Amino acid sequence: MLPEVIAPQKTISFEKIETAIYTSEEQACSAVAEEIADLINKRQESGQRTVLGLATGATPKKVYAALIQLYVSGKLSFKNVVTFNLDEYYPMKPGALQSYHRFMEENLFNHIDIDKNNCFIPNGDIPQEEVKAHCEAYEKKIEEYGGIDFQLLGIGRNGHIGFNEPGSHVSSATRLITLDHLTRFDAAYEFGTLANVPRKAITAGMGTILKARRIVLLAWGERKAMIVRQAVEGPVTEFVPASYLQGHHNVTFVLDESVAAELTRKKTPWLTDEVAWNNGMIKKAVTYLALTLHKPILKLTNNDYNQNGLSDLLALYGQAYDINIEVFNQLQRSITGWPGGKPNADDTHRPERALPAKKRVVIFSPHPDDDIISMGGTFQRLVDQGHEVHVAYQTSGNIAVADDEALRFIEFVKDYNAQFNIDSPQAEHIYDEALKFIQVKGSGEKDTPELRYVKGIIRRGEAKNTCRFVGIPPEQVHFLNLPFYETGLVEKSPIGPADFDIIEALIRKIEPHQVYAAGDLADPHGTHKVCLDGIFEAMHRLKNEAFFKDCWLWLYKGAWAEWDIDLIEMVVPMSPDQVLKKRNGIFKHQSQKDGVVFQGADSREFWQRAEDRNRATAELYNKLGLAEYAAMEAFVRWKF
Ligand code: F6R
């Protein structure tokens, strides 16, 4: 391994907007809440009110939670605060589940001492012919209150702020706007299906936003990393409305690490600043160089390093040849067909220990199909190589089953009973009730407990089927049904002690040598992140147990992105036949095929997404000059 060396200092910035990068969303949100509280308190001291511009959506929720905390602890009052929200869907009844009126009440206004007469939100419940006048009045009202002191913003994946979609003019005012396709796609989650998402919205304009005296834009999660980079480092363009903020004198982008990952100073830090040339950084730079130049690692020359901002690295270590070999070997050693360790082999340079030869393994799967989708090939190998593999399904996954799928199963029970003269008024009743409910069910409305139960057992049956297919006995299949998930809505409860206890008890019972978990460290809306937090907490509680010293945690990437190549510590290659077998394992999840409930913006079936991704990882290794495999599943080891 090459020794760590610090390169001489240089500081070049590509950023045209001030950015503040925090290690977590929580830290970022409490810092923003503190800034807002300071402003309110200072203005209050001099007898002035504060006018806040507010945003909705998943992003600012923790800021609102932190503000509520400050209010509850007596450090903040909203008596002297006026708020103007950015937007509202059109048409939209204020009481509807997805309305921003309701969002603000539930996430902030109902929990603080604000006078609701001072809370303004565009009205999505007026006739079309009144909208223009309503928008003009909204603008006027902001002016009457002296303009916005502090504007909070989120950002859409297309760069919208408020609902100023690409194409919005820099000086646009509050108006009715047609929503972009991507915006509607991203909102489909909350509305059940895309068809239910309104096509229009009323939004404060770009001009309205830019008049604010202070602007803070929040963004979390890797899904928005590219658009944040474009807004911060790219040209000012109507195609990325957030880039207009480059022209504002007092704006900060508050980011978490994962959304900042595409900024030049994070992606290729050697181009902007002094870096510590440690193992990870060298791997990052060399793989980046090889992929950018479309050259395998072993063909990189001194010239390539010099001409691409890596002369420091070369100067420190002498020769391209030495650096190339070092990184190539590291990648080579991450490839293993023995994810549970190879018995009787020298394991000095292998990702896993050889001993014990037979390991106890727990695969945590946030939903009932992440195990097979994300690490089906590895799951199969672990079983085939004789390890005691358990799967723990963390949530029931019940909200992702379509109503007609549930009805089909209830009908099956009804017909079966009729055929064999089994008198079950209960089954009849459940069917009738479910049918009645589904006929009147509103968009995104919560299912009845019976219907949720049915949906849950459908998914449970599919997961059992997969485990049977891979070859593990029923007693090694665990359904945790974590309570935080069971709200019946997209919105889940916060994870808490009841969930931690369940996860802890399972790990304690099995005393595993290996734990696999969905490592979506930065998936702000996601169940995966919450499920991972639960595992971290349970492991934290178990850290002093004897077995824990010998327990390794491997993270697979549960969502559709793969780990960055420089982070990967183990890759398990798959042959074409193994790819096919995995596909058949995924097929067991019938309820998740053919246009599922929460399809999102990606219309590919789950097996296609999994195959594309595993093929891409194999191609990446191959492009870097390593052997050519059909597919690969990648893992990062989490060290406590
Ligand atoms: C909402 C708004 C939008 C959102 C953006 C991000 O009031 O103005 O610009 O901030 O669509 O939404 P989330 O936070 O749900 O990803």
Image: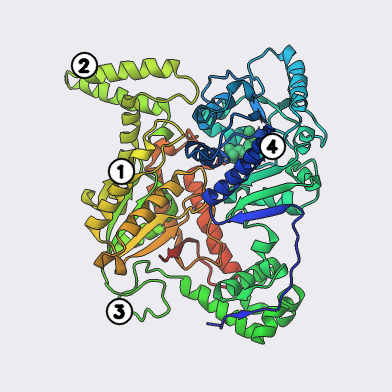
Q: Which mark is residue 425?
A: 2
Q: Give coordinates of residue 614: x percent, y percent.
A: 50, 57
Residue at (51% x, 27% y) in the render: 110
Where, quadrant-wise, is the C terminus in this rendering? Answer: bottom left
Callout 3: SS: loop
Q: Which mark is residue 498?
A: 1
Asked whether residue 153 appears in the rendered view, the answer is no
Q: Are marks 1 and 4 in contact (CB under 8 Å)?
A: no
Callout 2: SS: helix
Q: Label 3 belongs to which residue?
A: 344
Separation (CA) of disc 1 from disc 4 = 47 Å
Amino acid type of the residue tagged 1 in the rendering:
Ala
Q: Are marks 1 and 3 in contact (CB under 8 Å)?
A: no
Q: Label 4 belongs to which residue?
A: 46
Separation (CA) of disc 2 from disc 1 = 35 Å
Separation (CA) of disc 2 from disc 4 = 70 Å
Amino acid type of the residue tagged 2 in the rendering:
Pro
Separation (CA) of disc 3 from disc 2 = 61 Å
Label located before the other in sequence (3 or 4): 4
* Mark 2 Cα-neighbour bin, 10 Å: few <14, some 14–19, many ≥20: few
Label located before the other in sequence (1 or 4): 4
Residue at (58% x, 40% y) in the render: 60
